[in-house]
Image: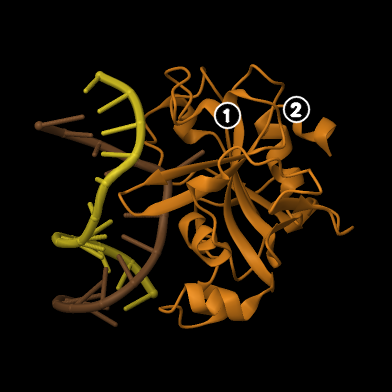
Chain colours: A orange, B yellow, C brown
Amino acid sequence: MRRLLEQDPVEVAPLLLNKVLMHEGVAGRIVEVEAYRGEHDPASHAFRGRTARNAVMFGPPGHLYVYFTYGMHYCCNVVCGPAGTAGAVLVRALAPLAGLDEMRARRPRARSERDYCSGPAKLCQALGIDRSLDGADLLARSSAVRLLDDGLQPPSGARLASGPRIGIPVESVTGLQPWRFWVSGDPNVSRRENRAGRVAV
DNA sequence: CTTTGGATCGTCT
DNA sequence: GACGATCCAAAGG
């Protein structure tokens, strides 16, 4: 798994679909992700170099990068690429798998199970992920938060969908890149598949 | 169903 | 001092 994550985030991103993210027994299957590169990606937190916030992005692959945004939300990424090079895959949505009661308690305003993890900040809330987990090794047995492979293969063919990343200005060069990947048709994906989405080869 | 605006504060200019 | 890799409620069709 570590070797897989050492590749370019754009290569890794679709391969993380159908993997499982778990924090203290509360878990979900990854159904939507976005790839972020480093210095050549204007949309990346690492575009302007290393800072205290994004330091983990420059570290070894397989660790968790958690950032705080909008004054109230956390979002989490799987760090990719070789150590010394910035790269990460933002986890945008999960299909709830375990700890559903815990998720409901942490997301009281959710109207249905679909509302538990259908967004990058929602899933962090549902799993109880915050800045204290920034830098955690997702592949270590001893970690509270882990990335697991339960044997289900990543989607391919028509089951894999891709499109432009969300919240990225389209006028920027990378804003048009189809670096958002999701499991086609999964109800937990953060935004419904629309004209922007297209099936990847 | 879609659109719009408010919340709220760490981070970087 | 401005601005988010967002979410939610409210309002309009």
Check the residue under mark 1 and report the chain it is in. Answer: A
Disc 1 packing (10 Å; few <14; some 14–19; many ≥20): many
Residue A167's x, y, as percent?
40, 44
- Which of the marked residues, 1 or 2, is nearer the chain's N terminus? 2
Residue C1, located in which quarter of the rendered image? top left
Disc 2 packing (10 Å; few <14; some 14–19; many ≥20): some
Q: Residue furthest front?
A: A142
Q: Nearer the viewer, residue A172 or A99?
A: A99
Residue A139's x, y, as percent?
78, 43
What residue does disc 2 label? A7
For mark 2, give the secondary structure.
Answer: loop
What residue does disc 1 label? A57
Left or right of A69, for residue A184 = right
Residue A32's x, y, as percent?
62, 54
- Which residue is located at x 86 percent, y 54 percent? A153
Q: In whole angstroms, how far apart are the C-alphas of marks 1 and 2?
A: 14 Å
- Which residue is located at x 48 percent, y 19 percent? A50
What amino acid is found at the position of numbered circle 1 in the picture?
Answer: Met
Left or right of A152, for residue B7 = left
Asked whether the viewer can see residue A183, the reply is no
Q: Say above or below: A39 vs C3.
A: above
Do the numbered discs 1 and 2 sit on residues whose CB atoms are within 8 Å?
no
What amino acid is found at the position of numbered circle 2 in the picture?
Answer: Gln
- Which residue is located at x 41 percent, y 39 percent? A168
Residue A103, located in which quarter of the rendered image? bottom right
Q: Nearer the viewer, residue A188 or A20?
A: A20
